[in-house]
């Protein structure tokens, strides 16, 4: 270390210590090292395990470089400049400022270790600040601490290099050249249409006897009447980034993440010579640019602004104690726009890029709401693609990856949207990929919202099939409908990362295959896997000769009864026996059917005192209470404009003067429409009730929330609307 010359006289112990301080540039590097350990490294750890964070925004390699270099060096550089400005006035003051920065950044580092060990946020901050002060004192008093901080100065450069060049992010920074040539000799004249939903367990479509619930999902039931339902199909991964490539390549993912920006072999390269390729991949870039045109990107400033907004949430989630982090929007379950997901209020923008082709048949326009841009843009792209389905020219290959019924759950059964309440779902803790509360009511409301959005998925399916029939390709086409993976709703359990407990709902995904000319139903009960889809396409189209797959055609018998699903977060495969998975899947289907019985009203009966539903408020006895509720989105109930594309069926609000578990009843225009109970959230005691869409007819409605006592007595808590 070099000594810094004295600019102003200092005395005694301070002078002796100051004479041994490093040069200003080394002091700056020390700040950079602490900043890196306190925020940059944990932030990189989160992001390098989720490449979709950048893909979802269409970020370029330049965007990623700007982010990575900026987040690593911008703050330390700013702090160093502050020190230099102070140093120009007083070297002693500059040293005091440096000690302050050392204390704060050391506290940030300490917080990463302390926050999980103490229940209260205040205590975690106090201990972290105390540790930071101790480090600053040691830096002032001892050469050993100054030497230690000098030794770790390479940390920012090391972590930056590892993030950019030795993690899955590296494939976005320096894309692979693989996958740019067509493999195979092409196929027959068979049109191929693949519709891939996101986060849809097979059990969600079933009733108590494990057949398709035709009352709730009529179009899935119709598809089953003219196709083969592979009822026991299994995904090979719990995450989109590896599950979709497995579907589109027929290749099993490796346990350790080896995510690519291109793939040497896929359904695209197999059929490119003989088929006209049209594809919407929401997240994955399996189709090479030599076959599929690049997805349109937003302007650079818009991309970087979106990245910065969402990164502020990620940083808060990474750094802050759990109590504060839980107040931020969730980041573990959505791929974009979660910085806006917590936005509330009735503001509804105009149509985004208004286009009459960007809508599904018999569904309202896909409006833009706070936090919805990423999913809604995907739906508009899918709608445009399906409305452009044609039988002219070469036989088509259409691939559509639809980001529903994946969170955020915001679509009603017919496609009307509603504003959400904070993050993705009340009761979903954003850790380890999402962990549910142990409060069964809150988890059941989440399942309810998911099933309602699955009803919208049923309408999307009908729209795609209708368009295929209009284009004259339905009868001769190979049509495949599946999902990348499932989702779980177990109180206290994991929402998505696959575990032994949630294996049936994560692993078992829908798979319907309509062969060319098929008009009758078939149900195949053998074990099939998502990696068997492309080998089946190769068999039907007589394409891909010489290609090797990990899967086999669906017509083949399975060679094993073992089921393996990759846990993306732990980077290992979770194993289960096929018979056990199916037995537990059937139990799950019966359990969900018991909570939400078939029929149009079955999804809207949840919570205590269900006998109140349908009764007039005026006919019920009254009670008094000191509790009060402030309901959200009052204006949306005052202007229920038909065709607007927004219907606020999600009744939310805050309740004061009451505890969790208070029985509630929601009335619309004087009739009890739904019941529920108050719940505890990071935002306090809240109401979270789904209103039946049919209860909100006309142009406006008066919504009232009551506390229920004695099973029938109502006490008004608050109201919204006209």
Image (spheres, grey):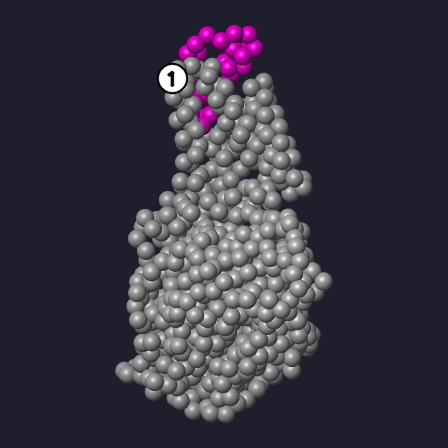
Q: Nearer the viewer, residue 518 or 346?
A: 346
Residue 72 image position (x, y, % from top left): 44, 39
Answer yes or no: is residue 444 visible: no
Q: Is residue 314 magenta?
A: no
Which secondary structure lies at badge 1? Answer: loop
Answer yes or no: is residue 357 visible: yes
Q: Residue at x 62, y 39 (%)?
A: 121
Q: Residue at x 46, y 53 (%)?
A: 344
Q: Nearer the viewer, residue 494 or 450?
A: 450
**Which quadrant of the structure image shows residue 414?**
bottom left
Q: Is residue 20 magenta?
A: yes
Q: Residue at x 39, y 15 (%)?
A: 89
Label 1 neighbour load within 10 Å: few <14, some 14-19, many 20+: few
Q: Is residue 180 left or right of residue 710?
A: left
Residue to which mark 1 is pinned: 88
Total labels: the figure holds 1
Instruction: Name the outermost residue toward the right.
Output: 710
Residue 324 image position (x, y, % from top left): 57, 43
Residue 153 image position (x, y, % from top left): 49, 32
**Figure check: 36 above or below 509:** above
The stretch in magenta equals 4-28
Q: Is residue 225 left or right of residue 501?
A: left
Residue 119 image position (x, y, % from top left): 67, 41
Q: Residue at x 59, y 40 (%)?
A: 112
Q: Nearer the viewer, residue 290 or 528?
A: 528
Q: Nearer the viewer, residue 251 or 688?
A: 688
């Amino acid at each position: 270390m070099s000594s810094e010359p004295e600019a102003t006289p200092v005395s005694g112990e301070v002078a002796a210590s100051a004479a041994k301080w490093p040069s200003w540039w080394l002091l700056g590097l020390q700040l950079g090292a602490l900043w890196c350990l306190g925020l940059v490294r944990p932030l990189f750890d989160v992001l390098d395990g989720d490449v979709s964070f950048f893909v979802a925004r269409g970020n370029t390699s330049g965007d990623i470089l700007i982010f990575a270099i900026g987040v690593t060096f911008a703050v330390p550089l700013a702090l160093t400049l502050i020190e230099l400005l102070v140093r120009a006035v007083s070297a002693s003051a500059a040293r005091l400022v440096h000690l302050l920065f050392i204390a704060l950044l050391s506290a940030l580092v300490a917080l990463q270790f302390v926050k999980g060990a103490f229940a209260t946020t205040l205590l975690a901050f106090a201990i972290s600040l105390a540790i930071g002060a101790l480090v600053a004192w040691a830096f002032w008093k001892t050469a050993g601490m100054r030497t230690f901080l000098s030794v770790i100065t390479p940390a920012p450069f090391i972590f930056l290099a590892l993030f950019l060049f030795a993690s899955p992010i590296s494939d976005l920074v320096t894309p692979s050249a693989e996958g740019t040539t067509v493999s195979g000799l092409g196929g027959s004249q068979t049109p191929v249409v693949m519709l891939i939903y996101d986060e849809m367990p097979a059990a969600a479509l079933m009733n108590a006897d494990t057949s398709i619930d035709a009352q709730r999902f009529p179009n899935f039931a119709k598809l089953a009447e003219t196709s083969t339902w592979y009822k026991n199909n299994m995904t090979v991964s719990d995450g989109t980034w590896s599950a979709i490539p497995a579907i589109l390549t027929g290749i099993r993912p490796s346990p350790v993440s080896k995510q690519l920006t291109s793939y040497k072999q896929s359904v695209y390269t197999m059929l490119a010579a003989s088929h006209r390729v049209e594809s919407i991949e929401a997240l994955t870039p399996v189709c090479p640019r030599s076959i599929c045109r690049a997805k349109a990107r937003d302007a650079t400033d818009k991309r970087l602004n979106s990245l910065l907004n969402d990164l502020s949430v990620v940083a808060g989630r990474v750094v802050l104690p759990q109590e504060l982090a839980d107040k931020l929007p969730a980041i573990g379950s959505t791929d974009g726009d979660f910085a806006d997901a917590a936005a509330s209020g009735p503001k509804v923008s105009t149509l985004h890029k208004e286009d009459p082709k960007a809508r599904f048949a018999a569904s309202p326009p896909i409006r833009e709401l706070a936090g919805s841009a990423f999913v809604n843009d995907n739906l508009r792209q899918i709608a445009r693609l399906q409305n452009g389905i044609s039988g002219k020219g070469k036989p088509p290959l259409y691939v559509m990856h639809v980001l529903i019924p994946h969170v955020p759950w915001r679509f009603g059964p017919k496609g009307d949207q509603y504003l959400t309440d904070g993050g993705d779902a009340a009761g979903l803790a954003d850790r380890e990929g999402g962990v549910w509360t142990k409060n069964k009511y809150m988890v059941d409301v989440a399942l309810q919202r998911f099933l309602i959005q699955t009803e919208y998925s049923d309408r999307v399916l009908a729209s795609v099939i209708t368009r295929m029939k209009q284009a004259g390709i339905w009868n001769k086409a190979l049509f495949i409908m599946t999902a990348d993976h499932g989702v779980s709703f177990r109180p206290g359990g994991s929402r998505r990362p696959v575990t032994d407990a949630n294996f049936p709902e994560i692993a078992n995904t829908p798979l319907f295959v309509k062969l060319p000319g098929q008009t009758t139903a078939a149900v195949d009960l053998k074990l099939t896997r998502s990696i068997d889809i492309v080998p089946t396409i190769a068999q039907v189209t007589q394409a891909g000769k010489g290609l090797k797959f990990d899967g086999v055609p669906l017509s083949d018998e399975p060679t094993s009864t073992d089921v393996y699903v990759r846990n993306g977060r732990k980077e290992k495969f979770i194993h289960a026996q096929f018979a056990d998975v199916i037995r537990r899947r059937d139990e799950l289907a019966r359990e969900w059917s018991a909570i939400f019985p078939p029929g149009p009203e079955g999804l809207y009966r949840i919570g205590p005192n269900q006998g109140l539903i349908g009764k007039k408020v005026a006919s019920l006895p009254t009670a008094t209470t000191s509790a009060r509720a402030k309901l959200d989105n009052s204006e949306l109930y005052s202007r229920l404009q038909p065709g607007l594309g927004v219907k606020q069926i999600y009744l939310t609000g805050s309740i004061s003067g009451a505890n969790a578990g208070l029985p509630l009843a929601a009335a619309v225009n004087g009739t009890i429409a739904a019941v529920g109970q108050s719940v505890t959230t990071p935002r306090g005691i809240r109401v979270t009730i789904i209103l039946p869409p049919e209860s909100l007819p006309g142009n406006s409605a008066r919504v009232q929330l009551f506390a229920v006592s004695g099973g029938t007595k109502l006490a008004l808590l608050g109201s919204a609307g006209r």
